[in-house]
Image (cartoon, helix red, strand yellow):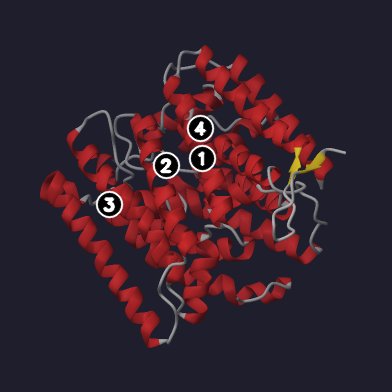
Amino acid sequence: MSTASLAASGRGAAVRIDRLFLGLALGATAILIALVLLDHQPASAALVLGGFGLGIVFLKAEFSYTASWRRFVTRGDASGLLGGLIVIVICALVVVPVAALSPKYGGAIAPLGPSLVIGAFVFGVGMQLANGCGSGTLYTVGGGSGRMLIALLFFVIGSVFGSLSLPAFLALGGIDPVLASDYFGAWGGLAVTLASIALVASAIIAIARKRGANFVPSRSYVIGGIAIGLLCVAVFFAGGHPWSVTFAYTVWGAKAATALGLDLSHSAFWQWPGPKRALTDSVLSDTSSLTDFGMLFGAMAAAAATKPFAATAWPPVKSLLAAGIGGLLMGWGARLGFGCNIGAFVGGVASGSLHGWIWLLAALPGCLLGIRLRPLFGLSRE
Amino acid sequence: MRTVYIVVVVLGVAAILVDHLSSPSSGRAMSPEDFAGACAPCGAPCPSKK
């Protein structure tokens, strides 16, 4: 038996440690850290540890962008959406000025155009069908959800297709990134960024009030939001850029496709310097892969430390189908939209980049469509 | 489901090990944004550069 019961609490609840999976999570994390430290890369070890912490916090706080946005779209409940803005405020306080003042650091930027809007919309549909976004997929897979394991597999596949589609969508046109600090300087850019967040928060609260819904974040969302925000700052300092999730999926998929004999190196996307290097170099040289691995194993450790891991049965086939379709859409949409709710929305807004807000505005209608499609797969709209 | 997870974790870590040991390492971990001309987290070029 791989689980062990600890002393029961006064309320009679027992904490059961799943030693097998706790050992697997800690062992895998230790291997990754040892590999990067052997290459004299302490910053890479910090990225793994930062991701590990994010996995724990997301799982423990049950911090879900997907459910929060669904509650806002269906009922006007803005509590989770506002909780998510806490993360962005904390990140912005550091990312906007540091990225503007230090050449060693950069913000999350992206061009504005059809690719961004289409990608974010499709991502919004996918996140409601899969029932998890970029970060949500990671921590629920790490937390023992077999359904989200399917979503992650198709997320990876979809993002490879997205990498092949992106150059054609970029050819439709667009303009260069619009960054607040480029126009107002480091501190003026920060003021404008915080003002934009306050403006959006006010609008969200107004909508919630009009619909008679709650807009006060729960205690776990406030504490979780602060912890995630601080970990985002740590990841920013370790990696030189705001936390991002989905580029790693594209790299994993492309490396797997290459191992299966598919040559992606001639496609336009994989000839750009960054992706080209990511495809040929070690996966542990990619910042987003390092935090993703850490987050998976952090969530696994947190889940296995409290109860038997992955002890539930597989969900119905229709639910798995929704996870697969949602994963595919998210993967494709994340590449066209320059990231997910973390890399594009959180990272973008926290960098003072206009694309973050445009991503949100395009993703919310996608969420609405995805919510309407959920009953087709036996999923509730709530 | 537990068996599936064990297989996925073991194969995943093995794949990371094989990839890491058989691929060049550029020194520090990087993001595609670190390269000149990149305009997005995936390394896409800026529209004005085309």
Residue receiving disc 1? A53
Which chain letter goes with mark 2?
Answer: A
- Of A329 and B47, which appears nearest the observer? A329
Residue A203 in the figure: left or right of residue A67:
left
Both marks 2 and 4 on one chain: yes
Q: Amino acid at mark 1?
A: Gly
What is the spatial separation of the Cα atoms under label 4 and label 1, in whole angstroms?
6 Å
The location of residue A26, given as percent across then percent down, is 65, 30
Q: Secondary structure at mark 3?
A: loop
**Marking on residue A231:** 2
Q: Which residue is mark 4?
A: A49
* Labelled pair 4, 1 in contact (Cβ < 8 Å): yes
Callout in the foreground (3, 1): 1
Report helix, strand or loop for mark 1.
Answer: helix
How far apart, in angstroms, are the residues tagged by discs 3 and 4?
A: 27 Å
**Disc nearer the start of the sequence (1/2):** 1
Q: Nearer the viewer, mark 3 or mark 4?
A: 4
Decide: marks 3, 1 in contact (CB < 8 A)? no
Query: On the picture, is A42 further left or further right than A198?
Result: right
On residue A353, the disc is 3
Q: Callout 3: 10 Å neighbours few (<14), some, many (20+)?
A: many
Asked if the residue at tag 2 contacts the one at tag 1, i.e. Cβ–Cβ closer than 8 Å, the answer is: yes
Q: CA distance from mark 2 to mark 4?
A: 10 Å
Q: Amino acid at mark 2?
A: Leu
Q: Nearer the viewer, residue A77 or A275?
A: A77
Q: Amino acid at mark 3?
A: Ser
The residues bearing labels 3 and 1 have C-alpha atoms spaced at a distance of 26 Å
Q: Earlier in the sequence, mark 3 or mark 4?
A: 4
Of marks 2 and 3, which one's residue comes earlier in the chain?
A: 2
